[in-house]
Amino acid sequence: MMRHVLASEWSKLWSVRSTGWSLLATVLTVVGVAVISGRSLLTYTAPGDVTAADVVGVATEGIVFGQLAICVLGAMAVTAEYGTGLIRSSLAAVPSRGLLLTAKALVVAAVALVTGTVTGLLAFLVARPMIGAPASGVGLTDPSVLRAVTGSGLYLAVLAVFALAVGTILRHSAATVTTLILGVMILPGVVAQFGDVGRAVSRWWPSHAGFQLLQVDRLAGQLAPWPGFLAFTATTAALLAVAAVLLTRRDA
């Protein structure tokens, strides 16, 4: 049963026009920012001051902007069906709401994982020549570099599921995307401005905590990479569970 539902969700995801555009926007944004930041780093930083963290930072800086496209991908995987009324057919074909939502989550996570991992590696390979000789000694085999670079795929995979859960709860594309922009890209920085309490909240903010996986070194006052990512994953799982309950009660 799961295999058939996964095949159906895969087909539906690629039938939505925004899927291809979202993935293309992710790749172009992340790689484009790597090019621009790489040249900037070379211009304003002394060669001896460039570290592995700097090179990876250039490669992953675009994720901050590219994650919006992945949010759209995850959100539209469910809100597009509500918008067109196709959700009624989906629920009729798959009586188990939990199975349907799980299949959607697996599909969007897989697509975001592959896209994010490939994009992260590509951005790293582009960033090095953009920075030039100062980055020549930094490679994927350096401590924590491979984890930080490929972590973009893991982070975006969980973010896509997070967006899917929010979309399932709100059932409206514009409301979901607006909520995600506020919750993922704006509020973490705003909250951090409110003293010690605000910084503590920001530290545990789901997307902000998860983003620490893309850091080579642990940043001062932030969670360590893996604990931060696990906190983000746990929050996403809880949100998906809430979405499953609401999907069952409201649309049964």
Image (tube, grey):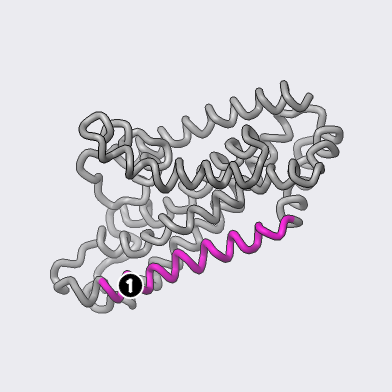
Please say if 132 is above or below 71: below
Quarter that holds the N terminus: top right
Camera-side residue of 243 and 93 = 243
Q: Is residue 39 magenta?
A: yes
Location of residue 134 (image quadrant): bottom left
User: Which residue is labeled 1 in the image?
Assistant: 128
Going 47% across and 35% down the picture, which residue do you hit? Answer: 233
Of the residues shown, which amino acid type is indicated by label 1? Arg
Q: Is residue 172 magenta?
A: no
Is disc 1 placed on a helix, strand or loop? helix
Quarter that holds the C terminus: top right
Location of residue 88 (image quadrant): top right
- Main SS type for the magenta part? helix
Camera-side residue of 87 and 83 = 83
| Residues in magenta, as a range | 16-40
Q: Is residue 251 visible?
A: yes
Camera-side residue of 199 and 239 = 199
Going 42% across and 51% down the picture, which residue do you hit? Answer: 151
Q: Is residue 154 visible?
A: no
Camera-side residue of 238 and 217 = 238
